[in-house]
Amino acid sequence: MTSGVELPHLASGKVRDIYELDDKHLLFVTSDRMSAFDVVMAEPIPDKGRVLTAITAFWLDQLSEVAPNHLVSLDVPAGAGDTADLEGRVMVVRKAEMLPVECIVRGYLSGSAWAEYKKTQTMHGQELPAGLSQSEKLPEPVFTPSTKATSGHDENISFDAAAELVGTEMAEELRRISLAAYQRGAELAATRGIIIADTKFELGVIDGQIAICDEVLTPDSSRFWPADEWKPGSTPPSFDKQPLRDWLEGTGWDKTPPPPSLPAEVVAATRERYVQAYERLTGLRFADWPGVRA
Ligand SMILES: Nc1ncnc2c1ncn2[C@@H]1O[C@H](COP(=O)(O)OP(=O)(O)O)[C@@H](O)[C@H]1O
Ligand SMILES: [Mg+2]
């Protein structure tokens, strides 16, 4: 699972292939692989890696006052491989010491947080007001960390449990940065008619400083909802994977590999969602992003 890059291959996650450029830098290649329910689909979504890279680059720029980040360059390094293929989907980043918690921020009650709330009126172990509905806006955004499972599913944990993993001072810093980044992102998205219901940041340490790493406020790492279709009590249709998830649910698939093969219409509709998310958020044309061919 590599991207034909002529550099030492370090790792491949569900979506990214990571190569070593030198002792301080990595080449991050965002593929068109699509995962849903933690399973990677057999069919790629054309240009999805470029959309994720473009959205991340946009946000890292917007968030530059919140915290430093890992991005060094969006150019394909000389000698890395087939430029036409890599253009628009690579990031040269500083190598970071990644922290063992995922920094989730939730502004709305959805997903695993809603499932927990229904059972125990808590969210990541923390009590919430009674009577909240699915997808309801929380009284204020909450930092709700999870473990970073090396295999299988991440586990939602309390702030105190995160403090045990990384130390109290570090956990407080992660919370401060994550909440500030979410707030800024959610405010900007709101002006474009998009609700960022929740999102996951991955923070790491570079030169002794906490830095925003990985992908940032993308449809893969967040729940994006069209603001005009949000209504507490139901799950709004979304810019993210919802159409794909709905289609997969409709097939009766048991969510273990292998996934059902995606019809061309589902692939095309999913690509369209990703492109729309970029264009609506940024006000920019995706056709202008490097490597995109009309
Ligand atoms: N600057 C960085 N230095 C080192 N590792 C990073 C950096 N930024 C992100 N990562 C890690 O790179 C991986 C990104 O690949 P991805 O395909 O998104 O993986 P996953 O399937 O775990 O989401 C993640 O494990 C993430 O923690
Ligand atoms: Mg990831």
Image (cartoon, helix red, strand yellow):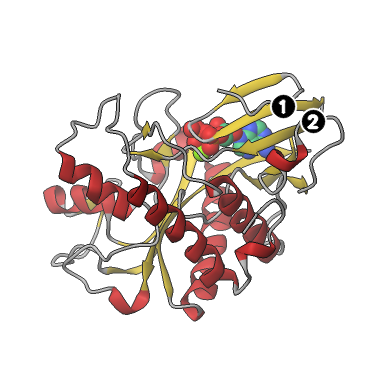
Viewer can see residue 126? no
Q: Crowding at label 2, few (<14), some or many (≥20) Cα neighbours within 10 Å?
A: some
Residue 213: image location, x then y, percent: 63, 44
Viewer can see residue 42? yes
Pointer 1 with pointer 2, Cβ within 8 A: yes
Give the residue at x 43% y 72%: 194
Q: Residue furthest right?
A: 78
Q: CA distance from mark 1 to mark 2?
A: 6 Å
Query: Which residue is identified by label 2?
Result: 80
Q: Is mark 2 within 8 Å of ligand 1?
A: no
* On-image quarter of the N terminus: top right
Q: Crowding at label 1, few (<14), some or many (≥20) Cα neighbours within 10 Å?
A: some
Give the residue at x 69% y 49%: 88
Closest to the observer, 25 or 158: 25
Residue 148, placed above or below residue 178: above
In the rendered structure, the answer to whether residue 96 lies left or right of residue 258 reads: right
Residue 71, placed above or below residue 187: above
Secondary structure beneath label 1: loop
Amino acid of disc 1: Val
Closest to the observer, 292 or 204: 292
